[in-house]
Image (cartoon, rainbow, N blue to C red):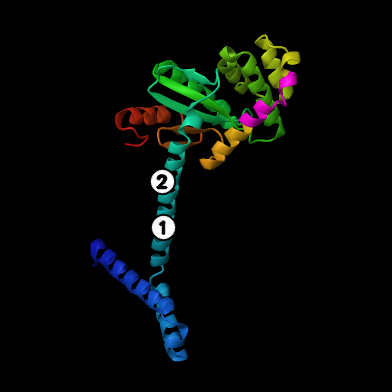
Amino acid sequence: MTSPRRSSTRLRRAGSLLLALTFVASAVPAQAFDDAQTKDIEGIVRNYLLTHPEILIESMQALEAKRTAEETHSRRQTIETSRAALESTPAGTALGAKDSDVTLVEFFDYNCGYCKRAASDMEVLLDSDKKLRVVLKEIPVLGPASEAASRVSLAFRSLKPESYGAFQRQLLASKAQVDEARALQVAKDFGVEASALKPLLQSSSIQTELQQAGALAMALGIDGTPSYVVGDEVVAGAVGADALAQKIANVRQCGKASC
């Protein structure tokens, strides 16, 4: 019986032989081989792949791992260069501790079902962690209704920043689609009339903020909500309060989201 280690060694040697043959075939000018030699080389490569198809799987896995590592490195660099844009924010958008030691950034859409379910995660984290700061970034990726709701939301925040966090939670708690009408109704519940908000909805400041948040998400490779940035990582999806709390704890322990 062949041991796994010996089998693995043979595979590596065979793979090296295949790579060497492929390199020789590609590096040497085509005219260096006659037709018979070219046919022989092609036959060797073909027969080897047919006999050891697992080499293709290993190669694909290695390529995927390499690409993932490169994407992770690139994303971490983007997070560092974008740190100020991620963590600096207008009044009202940052929740939790003012003298925080960790900042968690959440990208969300008011019509995202996962964002609605994950809203309680933020409450749990903020209630249990008095040194945490949460920055909210609105990226209305789910269509015109979401964009209209975000415009009302950002207008509301500009007029009543101290109530933005509560407004955001209540709007996310809506079971029906969140659109301009729904956002205006919730704003009214907080004492802000539609007549005060509507003139602001198409303002250049709101347009700029939506564009900047969208560009930041794109640069970070964020294409869905909710998504979070904690430490040096982008965390995609509604992973739950416990998973986020562990990432936060890691940042405190070793300066990275994964120690």
Q: Is 216 left, or right, of 79 in this rendering?
A: right
Please name the amino acid that badge 2 sits on: His
Q: Which residue is mark 1?
A: 61
- Asked if 207 appears above or below 189 in the picture, the reply is below
Asked if residue 236 is among those painted magenta in the image, a careful observer would answer: no
Q: Quadrant of residue 93?
A: top right
**Which of the 4 image quarters holds residue 252?**
top left
Q: For the residues marked 1 and 2, what is the alpha-carbon distance in whole angstroms?
A: 18 Å
Pinpoint residue 56: horizontal percent, then vertical percent: 42, 65
Q: Which mark is residue 135?
A: none
Mark 2: give few (<14), some (14-19) or many (20+) Cα within 10 Å: some
Residue tagged 2: 73
- Pinpoint residue 45: horizontal percent, then vertical percent: 41, 77
Q: Residues within 10 Å of mark 1 (few under 14, many from 20)?
A: few
Which contiguous range is marked in magenta?
198-209
Q: Quadrant of residue 14?
A: bottom left
Q: Residue 78 versus residue 245: which sits nearer the camera?
A: 78
Q: Quadrant of the N terminus?
A: bottom left
Answer yes or no: is residue 121 visible.
no
Do tag 1 and tag 2 residues touch (Cβ < 8 Å)?
no
Q: Secondary structure at mark 2?
A: helix
Q: Residue at x 42, y 29 (%)?
A: 244
Disc 1 marks a residue whose amino acid type is Gln
Q: Earlier in the sequence, mark 1 or mark 2?
A: 1
Q: Where the C terminus falls, by quadrant?
A: top left
User: Quick check: can you spot residue 255?
Assistant: yes
In this rendering, the label closer to the viewer, 1 or 2? 2
Q: What's the magenta bit mostly, secondary-structure-wise?
A: helix
Residue situated in front as seen by the camera: 107 or 209: 209
Q: Residue at x 72, y 27 (%)?
A: 202
Looking at this rendering, what residue extends furthest in the top direction? 191
